[in-house]
Image (cartoon, coloured by chain):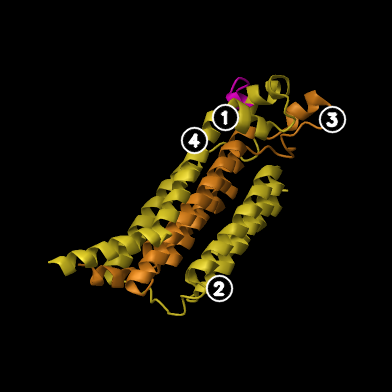
Amino acid sequence: MSETIVVLISLMIIGALVAIETPRLLYSIISVGAVGFLLSIVFLFLSAPDLAITQMAVEVITLVLLLQCTGGLASEQVSDQGSLFSRAATGTILLVLALFGASMLADFPEFGRPVIDRFADTPSGIYLREGLQQTGAANIVTAVLLDFRAYDTLGEATVLFCAVMGALSVLRRQGRRQSEGSDQEGEEVT
Amino acid sequence: MIYALCFILILIGLYGVLTRRNTVKIIISLLVIEYGVHLFLVLQGYRRDGVPPIIEPGGEEALWLQRSVDPLPQALVLTSIVIGLGVLALMVALSIRLYERFGTFDIREMRKLRG
């Protein structure tokens, strides 16, 4: 089981490298889509079917958005040659973070033994034990989302709404034309 | 081992954010970071030979309780995935606007054309 997950994450790493290194944007977008779908399969192997479904749906919308954004526009090639200083700075940042992460890895709990094994009274344990009686939901993940932590979901909806409003206000043309028109009128008056 | 691979995925995304000059490539790198972080959080709650946190009718509940994976990281990552989609839509919208204004995705050109 855990070997399968290792193989899948390795494939994800390869896909991410291809997505970042390939010069063509179309190939890059398709590769990152492959990484997302592999992540969905990893979620299935990690016993998270809800996450797998959500990841699939979100990944499809992500691909459509990115292709819509760049499909007609991006035939140009942008070179990624940085100066020596910027490459050295990047290398230093990544090296420091890698060392930091390596020193953290030793303290992580062993893979496959979640916190609820060691501490019985964590919120997760309580949700698992009392979820069905308190909420009547057989799926504990939805019980947590919509009942125990419903305020988090409300906040999620707020953030999502704000992001969509931001995207729409950046993209809409009506207001921009009006303001440009009023600028021209002002110039005519002066 | 698995945590290390997950960390490598996050570092690859960070490398992309730091070195790429194309706004769409930067968005893609941010997506890779996001995948890595989600994967890491869900890995924290995994139990060896675990079953999904869904109670099946007629199942043995005590046995399920001992084998179920941690539901809390899954619920919060579900929230995070959906928020990630909203943020991606915002980034793509900004990227399209920048392309219309400067005629390029190259962030260096944008800096030169300013003002």
Q: Are marks 3 and 4 on the same chain?
A: no
The chain that hosts pointer 2 is A
Circle 3 packing at 10 Å, graded few (<14), some (14-19), many (20+), is few
Q: Secondary structure at mark 4?
A: helix
The chain in yellow:
A
Give how far apart the Cα atoms at labels 2 and 4 are: 35 Å
Give the residue pinned by disc 4: A155
Q: Toward which corner of the image does residue A91 lie, by quadrant?
A: bottom left
Q: Amino acid at mark 1?
A: Ala
Picture layout, residue A25 above or below residue B48: below
- Observer-nearest residue: A167 or A25? A167
Picture layout, residue B96 above or below residue A73: above
**Which residue sits at x=65%, y=25%?**
A127
Q: Nearer the viewer, mark 3 or mark 4?
A: 4
Of pointers 1 and 2, the one earlier in the residue sequence: 2
Q: Nearer the viewer, mark 2 or mark 4?
A: 4
In the rendered image, residue A33, in percent from the top left (x then y), is placed at 59, 63
Give how far apart the Cα atoms at labels 3 and 1 are: 25 Å
Q: Are marks 1 and 2 on the same chain?
A: yes
Q: Using the image, tell me which numbered label, if any, was put on residue A27.
A: 2
Instruction: Say if residue B1 shows up in the picture.
Output: no
Q: Amino acid at mark 2?
A: Tyr
Q: Amino acid at mark 4?
A: Gly
Give the residue pinned by disc 1: A150
**CB under 8 Å between discs 3 and 1:** no
Give how far apart the Cα atoms at labels 3 and 4 are: 32 Å
- The magenta-colored residue range is A118-124
Give the residue pinned by disc 3: B57
- Observer-nearest residue: A166 or B107? A166
